[in-house]
Amino acid sequence: MIELRTPAEIDAMRPAGRFVAETLATLRDETAVGTNLLAIDRRAHDLIRRAGAESCYIDYHPSFGAMPFGKVICTSVNDAVLHGLPFDYTLRDGDLVSLDFAVSIDGWVADSAISFVVGTPRDEDLALIDTTERALAAAIASATTDKRIGDISAAIAAVARADGYAINTDFGGHGVGRTMHGDPHVPNDGKAGRGFPLREGLVIALEPWFLRTTDKLVTDDDGWTLRSADGSRGAHAEHTVAITADGPVVLTDRGFLGVD
Ligand code: MG
């Protein structure tokens, strides 16, 4: 069921959005060559506790998960791209890191993801991240009341295809509200002009992710981490966006922090 939010409800979602944005910016600043993925999770847990927020991940146990997630952040490194379960791994020079983070505050969820390289980047990794971020920007620009879900999907796919990346539609964007995953599903590929008409009050997480040379995923033995089938690296970018009469409002925008 697709739920629409009043302007007052969208305002009530802002503290969660702001906290998620601030936390991702902090974690990115603090993550470097030599940082352990478990330390990122501990730091995120500490920030959650101090803010009085609630993790959407720690007890998360959907049908495809082998067990509850048990951590508060997804850390996907190199050929891992989604749902990376933090484990005892120390980041090395040139690693491509994606952090995906969702909490609720006062009962409202925000969900966002960033990708970046620690240490010396490879050009091909920076290009992949850039495409993913431009696909997210194109998705946000399409989140207006004169469009449909398919327009967002088509906008994401056009950016990826122009840069030569294949698209996997198994995991994509979703409604956000009292819970992390609601209707509608927002695939990262689709037909313009099709699907649910975008309405004022719809709040959705938009999340393009691409792998460098494949669209096939495999699941790790941990039951969560999704990796490319061919070992190529992946990148992921996500924002929670409210569709309003005045256009899209990015609830997890990091711009106010002086970062992108
Ligand atoms: Mg997310």
Image (cartoon, rainbow, N blue to C red):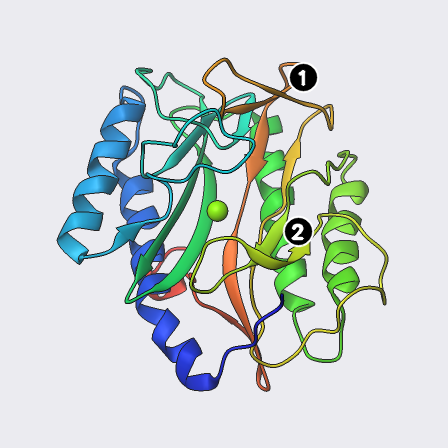
State left or right for residue 224 relative to residue 199. Answer: left
Q: Residues within 10 Å of mark 2 (few under 14, many from 20)?
A: many
Q: Which residue is drawn at 73% across and 36% down?
A: 168
Amino acid at the residue labelled 1: Ala
Find out if the beta carbon at label 1 lies less than 8 Å from the nearest ligand 1 atom: no
Looking at the rendered image, the quarter that the N terminus falls into is bottom right
- Name the foreground residue: 204 vs 98: 204
Distance in Å between CA atoms under marks 2 and 1? 22 Å
Residue at the farthest left position:
50
Residue 60 image-quadrant placement: top left
Residue 224 in view (yes/no): yes
Residue 167: percent from left, percent from top: 75, 37
Q: Name the residue under label 2.
A: 135
The residue sitting at 75% across, 57% down in the picture is: 155
| For discs 2 and 1, the disc positioned in front in the rendered view | 1
Label placed on residue 229:
1
Check the image and report above or below for 123 versus 179.
Answer: above
SS at mark 1 in the image: loop
Q: Position of residue 194 (x, y in %)?
A: 84, 64
Name the residue type under label 2: Ala
Residue at x-position 80% and y-position 42%: 161
> Would residue 100 appear left or right of 41 to someone viewing this image?
right
| Secondary element type, mark 2 | helix
